[in-house]
Amino acid sequence: MKSALLIHGAGGGGWEWNLWRGAFAAHGLQVHAPDLRPSPAGVRATAFEDYVAQMRDALRALPRPRVLVGASLGGLLAAIAADEADALVLINPLPPAPFHEGLPHRAWPDVVSWHRDARLASTRRAMPDADAAAALYAFRRWRDESGAAMRAAQAGIVVAKPQCPVLCLVSEGDEDVPAATTLALAAAWRADVVRLPAASHVAPLLGAGAIDAAKESMAWLSAR
């Protein structure tokens, strides 16, 4: 691989990939981890398609062969653009239809106030695998998210089976995207799987084992 585009999850930013960026760059990849940007009209007016367009533009700017890596909401976005990638790594992705039926029901407001309502205590609960410094770092950086984008993902988006190699990282302690849902998606797409015992939803990026997850993903890419 020559380059990698890393797509973060809802409410986060490119900062979530700091550990992964170093692991990939150490193998000579040109790494790009942009922030998903709200619409000029504001977060409330931001649609899922706005993120898809941003991601495709960023991917097309990178040299091939290129890998597309996505976590959570970013995983769904990455899967949509797999036709323009040479390999795909999905980390606890929000699943496409019909696998979205395995998600816990959530009613998303027009603006999901993860920045405005952020608390260090709730951040620590969401990141049980991370140390205190990592939780504080994340707490200061959460951003508000588009409810419309989250509702679109929750409702189920049809995505074609990728033609490139696919790796799924599955956190077995994930309460946001159940491990069984990601495993069913991986089986349908004949993806390779790395299971992370007892890990939380954000653990592969922000937990104590994040560097190991990045290195294991890089080893999988190198083998291809």
Image (cartoon, rainbow, N blue to C red):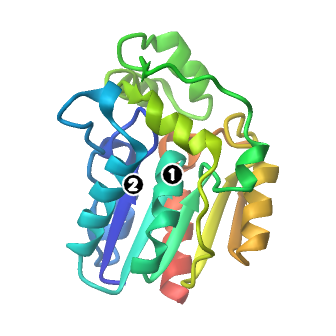
Tag 2 secondary structure: strand
In the image: residue 75, left or right of residue 129: left
Is 15 on the left-hand or right-hand side of 204? left
Instruction: Give residue 26's position: percent from left, percent from top.
Output: 32, 71
Please state which amino acid type lies under the numbered disc 1: Ala
Q: Look at 25% across and 64% down and name the residue there.
A: 58
Taking depth in this image into account, of 201 and 184 the one nearest to the observer is 184
Q: Which mark is residue 7?
A: 2
Residue 28 sits above or below residue 75 on the image: below
Image coords of residue 193 (percent x, y): 71, 68
Q: Earlier in the sequence, mark 1 or mark 2?
A: 2
Position of the N terminus, as image quadrant, is bottom left
Q: Residue at x 39, y 78 (%)?
A: 84
Q: Count how many numbered circles sit on residues in the image.
A: 2
Based on the displayed image, in which of its 4 quarters is residue 16 positioned? Answer: top left
Looking at the picture, how far across and down is residue 68, in whole percent?
Answer: 42, 69
Do the CB atoms of the residues marked 1 and 2 lie less than 8 Å apart?
A: yes
As drawn, is 206 to the left or to the right of 200? left
Residue 150 x %, y %: 51, 36
Residue depicted at x 59% and y 65%:
159
Please tell me whether mark 1 sits on a helix, a strand or a loop: strand
Q: Residues within 10 Å of mark 2 (few under 14, many from 20)?
A: many
Foreground pick, 9 / 79: 79
Q: Residue at x 46, y 56 (%)?
A: 77
Residue 39 against residue 156 in the figure, above or below: above
- Neighbor class of circle 1 (other Cα within 10 Å; few <14, some 14-19, many 20+) is many
Say which of 119 and 213 sits in front. 119
Query: How much space separates mark 1 and mark 2, taking CA atoms?
Result: 7 Å
Residue located beneath label 1 in the image:
71
Q: Amino acid at mark 2?
A: Ile
* Above/below status of 34 relative to 221: above
